Image (cartoon, rainbow, N blue to C red):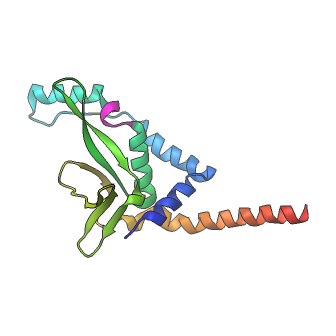
Amino acid sequence: GNFTGSAELMDAMMRDDSVAGIMDVRVKGLLGLPMLFKPVDGSGEFGSNVAAFVERNKDVFCPKDVLTELLASAIFLGFGFAQISWEPLTKDLWAPTFEFWHPQFISYHAHDRKWRAQTLEGQVEIDMHSGQCLCIKDGERSFMRGLVRSLGGLYLSRQHAFRDWDRWGELYS
């Protein structure tokens, strides 16, 4: 499926004060919780050092603006994607960072069960196991459970009611 229309509707819905307020509570409430990084059992001192390093640099690895967009996309559309890029922190140390992919550039092809992204070079397959992609989704067809499917009609109805109300005020005031 092509998610351009759904993504544009999601963006429009986020301009609504009620929807934006509720999304702020859900997403920012979740992101306001402490982010804990623990070493894998049996990783010893090295694992503890890595966990402590990630804890200190979590704002570099997991920028809140990217996480906010990822979570909002996952709630509205049922999925969220980000590309993982590596940036130098020091001369010898590179760190992963996330770049949000807007869902209007994402498509799902049911015939081969593959996700694809539209890039400047053309359409590319998203390899979930390459280590270059961060994906938030719940199951194979998670896009069927996004809120935009159930709230989109109500949002559009509300917008038409506002337009009618404004038009009536122009005519009869």
Query: What secondary structure is the magenta-colored segment mainly?
Result: helix
The residue that appears at 32% across and 67% down in the rendered structure is 108
The answer, for residue 138, to whether it is visible in the render is no
Q: Quadrant of the rendered structure where residue 110 is? A: bottom left
Q: In this view, does 93 lie to the left or right of 61?
A: left
Q: Is residue 158 left or right of residue 53?
A: right
Q: Compare residues 120 and 55 and report the one nearer the observer.
A: 120
The residue that appears at 90% across and 65% down in the rendered structure is 172
Q: In this view, does 60 lie to the left or right of 8?
A: left
- Estimate the x, y position of residue 60 in percent, counting from the top left: 32, 31
Residue 170 is one of the magenta-drawn residues: no
- Estimate the x, y position of residue 125 in percent, counting from the top left: 24, 61
- Estimate the x, y position of residue 98 in percent, counting from the top left: 31, 42
The residue that appears at 26% across and 41% down in the rendered structure is 85
The residue that appears at 56% across and 49% down in the rendered structure is 20
The answer, for residue 99, to whether it is visible in the render is yes
Relative to 101, residue 31 above or below = above
Where the C terminus falls, by quadrant? bottom right
* View extreme (right): residue: 173
Q: Quadrant of the rendered structure where residue 115 is? A: bottom left
Give, as a single range, the part of the protein colored magenta: 59-63
Where the N terminus falls, by quadrant? bottom left
Residue 61 is one of the magenta-drawn residues: yes
* View extreme (bottom): residue: 111
Q: In this view, does 129 lie to the left or right of 3?
A: left
- Estimate the x, y position of residue 22 in percent, counting from the top left: 55, 49
Q: How many marks?
A: 0
